[in-house]
Image (cartoon, rainbow, N blue to C red):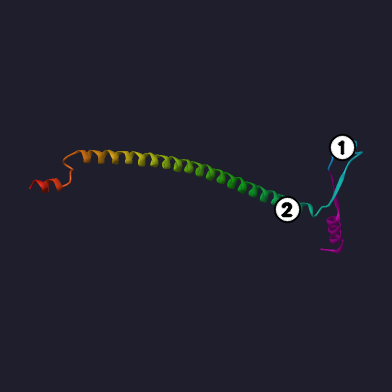
């Protein structure tokens, strides 16, 4: 590569690009943004990488939020089930006490279940 073409290439690398930030047809209030041309592709790639990372982070946050909400609903369902089982358990205990008392009363009233003391007295 000769010196003149190398100088032209370096000059081209130092050239700036003007990008309009306003849509102004009469150009009276045009805002110019000057960027070194060789940095634009690198910056655009960096911006795209940041956007991709932000998208991945957003998707991960959304997934985690949905997972937390699902777990909260599962916990609520399990808590309701535990409460229902506790209530059913109390009812069954109460019914068992009533049945136990009823059986005791029947046994005490029946001669079949009387103590053996009366049989020994008959002899």
The magenta span reads: 1-20
Q: Which residue is nearer to you in this view: 72 or 117?
A: 117
Task: Give the left or right position of residue 84, taking residue 4 as reference.
Answer: left
Q: Which residue is nearer to you in this view: 101 or 65?
A: 101
Q: Residue furthest left?
A: 123
Q: Give the CA separation, mark 1 to mark 2.
A: 29 Å
In the depicted structure, whether residue 84 falls above or below residue 34: above
What residue is drawn where x is 16% and y is 41%? 112
What residue is drawn where x is 38% and y is 39%? 91
Count neighbours of disc 2 (C-alpha within 10 A) and say few if under 14, some if 14 to 19, many if 20 or more.
few
Task: Indicate the quadrant containing the N terminus: top left, top right, bottom left or bottom right.
Answer: bottom right
Image x and y of residue 50, in percent: 70, 51
The numbered mark, 1 or 2, whose residue comes first in the sequence reads 1
Say which residue label 1 marks. 24
Image x and y of residue 68, in percent: 56, 46
Q: Secondary structure at mark 1?
A: loop
Q: Main secondary structure of the magenta part?
A: helix
Q: Secondary structure at mark 2?
A: helix
- What label does residue 46 carry, if any? 2
> Residue 14 lies in magenta, yes or no?
yes
């Amino acid at each position: 590569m000769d010196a003149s073409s190398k100088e032209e290439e370096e000059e081209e690398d130092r050239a700036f690009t003007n990008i309009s930030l306003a849509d102004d047809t009469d150009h009276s209030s045009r805002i110019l943004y000057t960027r070194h041309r060789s940095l634009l592709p690198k910056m655009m790639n960096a911006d795209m990488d940041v956007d991709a990372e932000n998208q991945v982070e957003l998707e991960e946050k959304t997934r985690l939020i949905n997972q937390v909400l699902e777990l909260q609903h599962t916990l609520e369902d399990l808590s309701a089930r535990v409460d229902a089982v506790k209530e059913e358990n109390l009812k069954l205990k109460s019914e068992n006490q009533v049945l136990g008392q009823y059986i005791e009363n029947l046994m005490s009233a029946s001669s079949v279940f009387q103590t053996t003391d009366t049989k020994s007295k008959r002899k």
